[in-house]
Image (cartoon, helix red, strand yellow):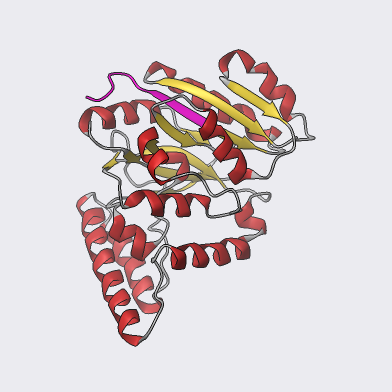
Amino acid sequence: MRYSRPTLSVVVPSFNQQRYLRQCLDSILAQRNAISVEVIVLDGGSSDGSAEIIRSYERDLAFWRSSPDRGQSAAIAEGFERASGELLVWMNSDDFFLPSAGASLADGLRKCPSADFFYGGISVVDAEGRRKQEKPTAGVNRWSFRYRGMIAYSMATFFRRELYDLAGPVNGKLRFVMDLDLFLRMIDHAKTCRLDRPHIIAAYREHAATKTSNILAVGIEEATYVRSLRGAWPTGGRLRRAAWKAGWVAANALRAAEMMRLGYGRIVFESLSRELRGLNPVSLVVPSRAREQ
């Protein structure tokens, strides 16, 4: 192994998320029984009492501040600059790790000692934390990112410092798809490893105040721009567009085969059928009753 017990630096950007902040921080600190954890919290000057909550965790934090900043992406970039861990991840303050996330990462490090990009699946929960559905992922590589778009989830994706230094930093100007932009830059250099013991390791919370609920149009515009910039969007003449479509079909077929091998066949066929009709990439969604890998 490259590291017997590497330190994971978790960067938490936050703004007016008092309601969810404790669950987020508690879920991070709970991973310390499986892996060394460094926590950095960057609050954008919240007015809802978040600073008082963060201060109550001060002894467990490597660094924190609560002051106006240039937004989420800039805060993540700042956090990674301050981080000292060999592994990096960011966790939005309304999301949280599941109890076995650290153990799953530790298992992945033993299984794939040369990997530098580790990814798991997520549960989607509502504002109260009730599970709505699960989103597994598989076959994360340059092909799948190029032709499918965002198929790794930032709160369940861990990468080594060396990879971030090579491909980073986080683009502080993006408001929505900073993760897609960073991962597209990383994937050409990355050695990936799927975390599967268990696979579902983090929770993404849907609620009325999320960006997805309020500025989705910005996200769509940014995603189109980023994918075009990184060569992951069908541009150019008819021949180039046809070649891109062929690549899209091949990438989907390979990923579908991997998902079927993992037991998600019915969901794969339903999702792929929708996508082939509209050539509109969407995530493979698995109901919460589906088995965890």
Query: Residue drawn 77% across and 29% down?
Result: 49
- Asked which quadrant contains residue 271, the reply is bottom left
5 within the magenta span = yes
* Location of the C terminus (image quadrant): top left
Above-or-below relation of 249 to 57: below
Above-or-below relation of 165 to 218: above
Horizontal arrangement in the rendering, residue 82 relative to residue 100 (left or right): right
293 within the magenta span = no
Query: Residue drawn 54% across and 49% down?
Result: 171
User: Where residue 218 appears, x then y in whole percent?
Assistant: 62, 63
How many numbered circles does the render carry? 0
Residue 129 seen from this side = no
- Asked which quadrant contains residue 46, the reply is top right
Query: Residue drawn 46% across and 24% down?
Result: 84
Taking depth in this image into account, of 140 and 69 the one nearest to the observer is 69
Q: Residue furthest bottom?
A: 238
User: Where residue 237 appears, x then y in whole percent?
Assistant: 37, 85
Horizontal arrangement in the rendering, residue 121 relative to residue 125 (left or right): left
Please state the extent of the stretch shown in magenta in the rendering: 1-11
Query: Residue drawn 32% across and 35% down?
Result: 198
* Location of the N terminus (image quadrant): top left
Q: Residue furthest front?
A: 166
Taking depth in this image into account, of 193 and 127 the one nearest to the observer is 193
Residue 130 seen from this side = yes
User: Where residue 185 appears, x then y in whole percent?
Assistant: 40, 52
User: Where residue 78 appears, x then y in whole percent?
Assistant: 58, 36
Q: Residue furthest right?
A: 47
- Asked which quadrant contains residue 164, the reply is top left
Above-or-below relation of 109 to 271: above
